[in-house]
Amino acid sequence: MAADPDPDPFSRRCVHLCIDMQRMFDEDTDWHTPWLRRVLPNVERLVGAGPEATVFTRFVPVSRADDAHGEWARYYRRWPSMTLERLDPGLVDLVPELRRFVPPARVVDKSVYSPWHRSRLDESLRRRGVEVVIVSGGETDVCVLATVLGAIDHGYHVVLAADCLCSSSDEAYDATVTLYLERYSSQVSVSSAEDIVGRWTPEPL
């Protein structure tokens, strides 16, 4: 039996999830992501098209490595400079170019890669009739990947804003986008910021 044709994702209610565009990834830290500054103008354009329909996530480190559970404790022992007892707390905030959109944009904090874990994000979006999530931010192969797979598991269609994604590895970025296209093509679309802005009609959350 032939599969039903995939409907235009922009004909359904969409929300923009902008992942971890924070100062600690933009500035000179051990987690600096050089691509962030490169894609920021496109992300800013996308957020500006619908701040009232945008949710920012922020990755919030633990205070000390010993506060983390299991492999996360070992992770933070590798990156002790990024625990809150050593990191300037202001670096957890969004970059200023995006912070200005809050409110009406919303912020969801998380302590792991996925924003769906131990949060009310799915409940909040379901209550507002959201069926499609537009995803931007970083990193393509870490927190964005966790966001995309979680969205799929929760039944959302994902529109990846390819020119709004950043990674600290060109090879991992390319491999991950290929993975999305080849393995999740019925649940993931890839578009540019320009295409999304031209087709998306934001509705307030």
Image (tube, rainbow, N blue to C red):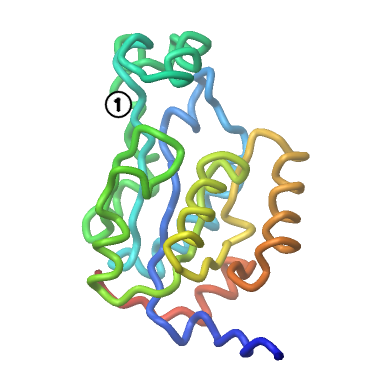
- The residue that appears at 66% across and 86% down in the rendered structure is 3
Q: Residues within 10 Å of mark 1 (few under 14, many from 20)?
A: few
Give coordinates of residue 90: x percent, y percent. 29, 26
The C terminus - image quarter: bottom left
The N terminus - image quarter: bottom right
At mark 1, the secondary structure is: helix
Q: Amino acid at mark 1?
A: Gly
- Residue 147 vs 81, above or below: the answer is below
Residue beneath disc 1: 90
- The residue that appears at 53% across and 43% down in the rendered structure is 138
- The residue that appears at 46% across and 87% down in the rendered structure is 11
Q: Nearer the viewer, residue 136 or 132?
A: 132
Q: How many discs mark residues in the rendered view?
A: 1
Give coordinates of residue 102: x percent, y percent. 25, 53
- Residue 166 vs 158, above or below: the answer is above
- The residue that appears at 33% across and 56% down in the rendered structure is 55
Which of the 4 quarters of the picture holds residue 159?
A: bottom right
Q: Nearer the viewer, residue 188 or 168?
A: 188
- Residue 167 vs 202, above or below: the answer is above
Q: Nearer the viewer, residue 151 or 2?
A: 2
Q: Nearer the viewer, residue 202 or 40?
A: 202
58 on left or right of 9: left
Q: Residue furthest front?
A: 1
Which of the 4 quarters of the picture holds residue 121?
A: bottom left
Give coordinates of residue 149: x percent, y percent. 53, 54
Give coordinates of residue 50: x percent, y percent. 36, 69
